[in-house]
Image (cartoon, helix red, strand yellow):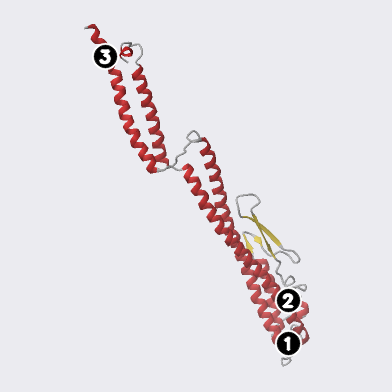
Amino acid sequence: MFGDITRVGANFNAMESLFNLKRVNGEIGQVQSRLSSGKRINSAEDDTSGYALSKHLQSRVNGLTQALDNVSTAKNVLNIAEGGYQSQMSILQQIKESLTQAADGALSTEQRGAIGDRIHSLLTEIDDIKSQTKYNGYTLFTDSGSDRTMTFQVGEENTDTFAVTFNSSGRNDIGETGGIDIDSIVGSNTGSAASGDWAALDQTEATAGILTLDSAIKSMAKTIQQMGDDQARLTSKEESLSLGISNTEATRSRIEDADFAKEQMTMMKLQILQQTSISAFTQSNSAPQVVLSLFR
């Protein structure tokens, strides 16, 4: 190495020390970037395959997170629909009670007519509930003879869908035998007791109406049960999505995020190397000074 010192045209030792110093400074900068951002991979250059994989996992996390929100929205829609069905079920129970009362032969025509007026009002309320049960501007219960099906996105893949059918629930839709025909139960003449215009409900119609209401209540109970089954499935999907988000995020973090203990340990090592590189560079620059002693 002494021969190299005597050739002052190129200070090889100083150049090598400078190269090592620049390399250490670059590594220190990379570690500082990781410590400041909290990520091990801040650009594709840091780890090309790791970068691609982490972005794929991040995309999956984003999709699952939004799907989880969609499931919550779907449950809200089903809760509103079930609330409408439950209100109609309560009315059907009241009508069944009224028809059972009207079927009793001890009642007078006027008394039975008053019951008919009440039943007419309750049946009208069933249609009002049908038209007023909405979510985000959409009427969940459609016109007579048709059902509404809503499809929810409950996963990150385009095939991860969940379809829910809302049965039409007007007074002419409920029941397994063609719905509730108001005319067949209370007749077409409706009014109030004060005006003396009674609903034309007789004992025979009341007795037949009980059978119709039994079918209607059975049908409505089945519809509400289906709402409950759908809600249970959505709750299961909620749990599955939450678990998927946690596991995927943990995998992404292991690949992309920085290990602070490891990075801090690396920083201490690099700082020592930086100081020794500076010292070596200084010594390498001063070594050729020995050539001047040859001219004394």
Q: CA–CA distance between discs 3 and 2?
A: 110 Å
Mark in front: 3 vs 1: 3
Gap in angstroms between the C-alphas marked 3 and 1 = 124 Å
Q: From the image, which quarter does the N terminus lie in?
A: top left
Residue 215: assigned label: 2
Percent of width and height locating residue 76: 59, 62
Mark 3–mark 1 CB contact (< 8 Å):
no
At label 3, which amino acid type do we have?
Gln
Closer to the observer: label 1 or label 2?
A: 2
* Coordinates of residue 252 in the picture (x, y in percent): 50, 45
Can you tell which mark lies on residue 117?
none
In the rendered structure, find residue 289 and report the number of the disc placed on it: 3
Q: CA distance from mark 1 to mark 2?
A: 17 Å
Disc sitting over residue 103 in the figure = 1
Residue located farthest toward the left when viewing the structure as drawn: 296
Q: Secondary structure at mark 2?
A: helix
Name the kind of residue labelled 1 in the image: Ala
The first of marks 3 and 2 along the sequence is 2
